[in-house]
Amino acid sequence: MGAHEIRTRLGVSRQRVEQLMKRPDWPDPYETLATGRIWRTEDIEAWIRVHRPNLDDED
C-alpha cells in the first residue's frame, strides 16, 4: 500500500497519514520507491486492528 491507499483505507487526509507515519508504533515501510514508500497490506491491516478497530474489515 502506498500513502494514497492508506489515506483512503483510513479515511483521513494526506497530512494525517504523514503524522501517523511518524508514530513509533507505525509499521516500517516494506520498500522505498522513486514514487515514495510502500507498506505491506498485512502490516497496515494489523496496525488498524490494534489502533483503529472500528475500521477493521468485518468480511
Image (cartoon, rainbow, N blue to C red):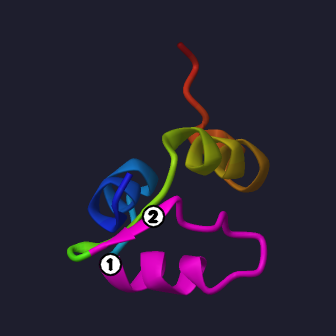
Which of the numbered marks, if any, corresponds to residue 31?
Answer: 2
The reply to whether the C-beta atoms of the residues labelled 1 and 2 are less than 8 Å apart is: no
Using residue 24 as the reference point, say whether residue 22 is left or right of it: left
Residue sticking out furthest to the left: 35
Q: Residue at left 40%, top 49%? A: 9
Q: Is residue 10 above or below residue 57?
A: below
Residue 14: numbered disc: 1
Residue 58: x and y in percent read 58, 19
**Mark 2 secondary-structure assignment:** strand
Q: Does residue 23 appear left or right of residue 41 in this picture? A: right
- Quadrant in the picture for residue 17: bottom left
Q: How many marks?
A: 2
Q: Where residue 28 sits in the image (x, y, percent)?
A: 63, 68
Q: Position of residue 19 (x, y in %)?
A: 53, 86
- Distance CA(mark 1)–CA(mark 2): 19 Å
Q: Residues within 10 Å of mark 2 (few under 14, many from 20)?
A: few
Depicted 36 relative to depicted 43: above or below: below
Is residue 24 inside the magenta stretch? yes
Label 1 vs 2, first from the N-terminus:
1
Residue drawn at (68%, 69%), measured in percent from left and top? Answer: 26
**Is residue 42 positioned above or below 21 on the image?**
above
The amino acid type, in three-letter code, at marker 2 is: Glu
| Residue type for callout 1 | Arg
Residue 51: image quadrant is bottom right
Callout 1: SS: helix
Tell me the magenta residue range.
Answer: 14-33
Q: Residue at x 54, y 66 (%)?
A: 29
Q: Residue furthest top?
A: 59
